[in-house]
Amino acid sequence: MEKKNIDWSNLGFGYIQTDFRFVSNYKNGAWEEGVLTEDANVVINECAGVLQYAQTVFEGMKAYTTSDGRIVTFRPDLNGERMEQSAKRLEMPVYPKEKFVEAVLKTIKANEAYVPPYGSGATLYVRPYMFGSNPVIGVKPADEFQFRVFTTPVGPYFKGGVKPLTIRVSDFDRAAPNGTGHIKAGLNYAMSLHAIVDAHKQGYDENMYLDAGSRTKVEETGGANFLFVTKDGKVVTPKSHSILPSITRRSLMQVAKEYLGLEAEEREIYLEELQDFAECGLCGTAAVISPVGKIVDHGKEICFPSGMTEMGPVTKQLYETLTGIQMGTIKAPEGWIVEVK
């Protein structure tokens, strides 16, 4: 298929409407088969559950053109599993993982003219989401829901190269110990908006949230998990029941062990030990790893030896290996790469 006439190398990270999206409705206790549609508008009642009580969950993933010209996506089964968990926690009907993957592949295939070419630095971002669609005025779950998948081509997260971030230890709490921090619910991101706007006003790139119970342990940022490297080359990531189980983070930990031969551990990480790490990064779908050069804890600066000019050596190895797997230049573990046919 002929590609759309888009200046791929100058794409930003924003929304561009593509031709098709997938839609399935849940009514009378069952999901419809679902269809591809050209209509990008969602029409719902003014009293829809999602508008009144934020009953919505979503996922974020990407499709790529590999070095040999195939269109692929990365570990969509894990996104499907995570959406199942999110739906259960918000009393929403589960859209089965197998159907989820099928819908994602159908939507990518229908929009393959928008999948950026290999080497452009751009990718096709894929957004599956679900929301309560029928009128709800009492505080209760909706009875009807809509599951949708749309796509948009996006440019590289880092325009003009990687620059390590400066982040602050936030006074805001991201999630309660027994709350919804472990699922990908829209409400988690809504509550982080004030904190990130405030951080930007103060000259910081992001917030570091601590556990709400003791405020002594590192959790995550508003939209990414933390990954640290010790001075002896061990990869460490925070363990908590109130952070999102990032697919990128889980993949990087496996890459560290199986491809780079490094020790990798998920454990509780205390704020007081940050000064002992050599490298720090934020990991997620958008950038894979964003390096962190400095953390500011209420005026106290914690500067990592990796510095403020480039990625640390271990972080760079992790980034290059995982992106190599995604782009087809490095052999992937079984089941990680799913081709769109």
Image (cartoon, rainbow, N blue to C red):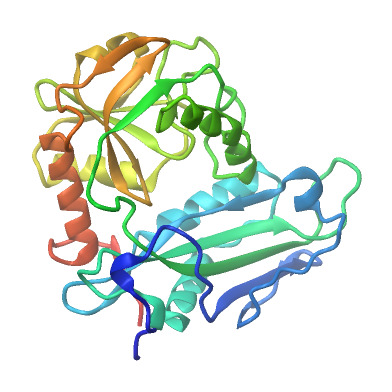
Residue 173 in percent (x, y) is at 56, 22
Drawn side of residue 141 relative to residue 297, left or right: right
Drawn side of residue 86 relative to residue 237, left or right: right
The one of 277 and 96 positioned closer to us in this rendering: 277
Residue 220 visible at all: no
x 54%, y 52%: residue? 83
Question: How many numbered marks are there?
Answer: 0
Residue 148 vertical placement versus 267 (above, below):
below
Residue 22 in percent (x, y) is at 58, 74
Drawn side of residue 87 relative to residue 284, left or right: right
Q: Quadrant of the C terminus?
A: bottom left
Residue 164 in percent (x, y) is at 26, 35
x 53%, y 81%: residue? 19
| Image quadrant where residue 226 sits | top left
Residue 204 vertical placement versus 43 (above, below):
above
x 37%, y 51%: residue? 285
Drawn side of residue 320 relative to residue 100, left or right: left
Residue 336 in percent (x, y) is at 28, 60
Residue 294 visible at all: yes
x 18%, y 44%: residue? 318
Q: Quadrant of the N terminus?
A: bottom left
The one of 332 and 313 positioned closer to us in this rendering: 313
Residue 121 vertical placement versus 39 (above, below):
above
